[in-house]
Image (spheres, rainbow, N blue to C red):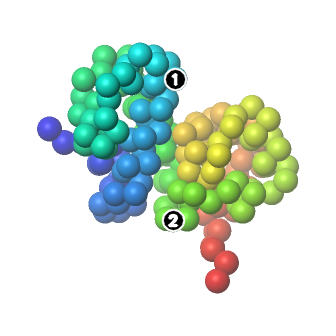
């Protein structure tokens, strides 16, 4: 059976990308574990989570948590494009002060990749449509300092 999280990482980056795949799997596991902490008992990150087996055993409701986050990530990266730097880049490196204050007022992303789990509609609600449109263009045009 194909691994949907691995497929999502490949869809976002345009090919196999183990770092994004593993980040997605860890983040999905953590999100599910926050909802149902007991589910993490006896789970091996290496053998169960990173292999994808953990997600196959979940109820549809718990799988739904991962599905929503993956759909948001696809939508986010379709808007701005993929860059390896997004995985660990601090928010301050790409957001202006207004965007940073509005986004961190209601959500707690720790880096730019965490932003990908926030729905575009929620970002528009936090920033307003005009500022959200600016954000997408700003991130799409972002280039690492050379």
Q: Position of residue 105 (x, y in %)?
A: 79, 35
Left or right: 42, with 87 as reference point = left
User: Which mark identifies residue 26?
Assistant: none
- Judged by depth in the image, the label closer to the viewer, 1 or 2, is 1
Q: Position of residue 119 (x, y in %)?
A: 58, 36
Q: Position of residue 138 (x, y in %)?
A: 69, 62
Question: Within 10 angstroms of label 2, few (less than 14), some, or many (20 or more) residues?
Answer: some
Check the image and name the residue furthest to the left.
1
Residue at mark 2: 83
Q: Earlier in the sequence, mark 1 or mark 2?
A: 1
Residue at mark 1: 34
Secondary structure at badge 1 equals helix
In the rendered view, tell whether residue 104 sits above or below residue 37: below
Check the image and name the residue furthest to the bottom.
146
Question: Within 10 angstroms of label 1, few (less than 14), some, or many (20 or more) residues?
Answer: few
The Cα atoms of the two marked residues, 1 and 2, are separated by 28 Å
Residue at (72, 62) in percent of width and height: 93
Quarter of the image that includes the N terminus: top left
Quarter of the image that includes the C terminus: bottom right
Left or right: 85, with 23 as reference point = right
**Which residue occupies the foreground of this view, 53 or 68?**
53
**Which residue occupies the foreground of this view, 81 or 116?**
116
Residue at (72, 47) in percent of width and height: 132
Q: Is residue 80 visible?
A: no
Residue at (57, 57) in percent of width and height: 88
């Amino acid at each position: 059976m194909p691994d949907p999280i691995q497929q999502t990482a490949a869809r976002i980056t345009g090919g196999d990308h183990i770092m994004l795949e593993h980040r997605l799997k860890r983040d999905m596991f953590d999100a599910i574990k926050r909802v149902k902490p007991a589910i993490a008992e006896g789970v091996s990150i290496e053998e169960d989570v990173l292999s994808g087996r953990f997600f196959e055993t979940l109820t549809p409701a718990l799988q739904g948590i991962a599905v929503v986050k993956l759909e948001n990530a696809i939508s986010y990266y379709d808007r701005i494009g993929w860059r390896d730097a997004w995985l660990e880049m601090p928010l301050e490196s790409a957001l202006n002060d207004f965007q940073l204050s509005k986004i961190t007022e209601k959500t707690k992303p720790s880096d730019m990749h965490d932003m990908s789990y926030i729905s575009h509609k929620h970002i528009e609600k936090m920033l307003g449509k005009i500022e959200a449109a600016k954000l997408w263009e700003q991130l799409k045009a972002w280039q690492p300092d050379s």
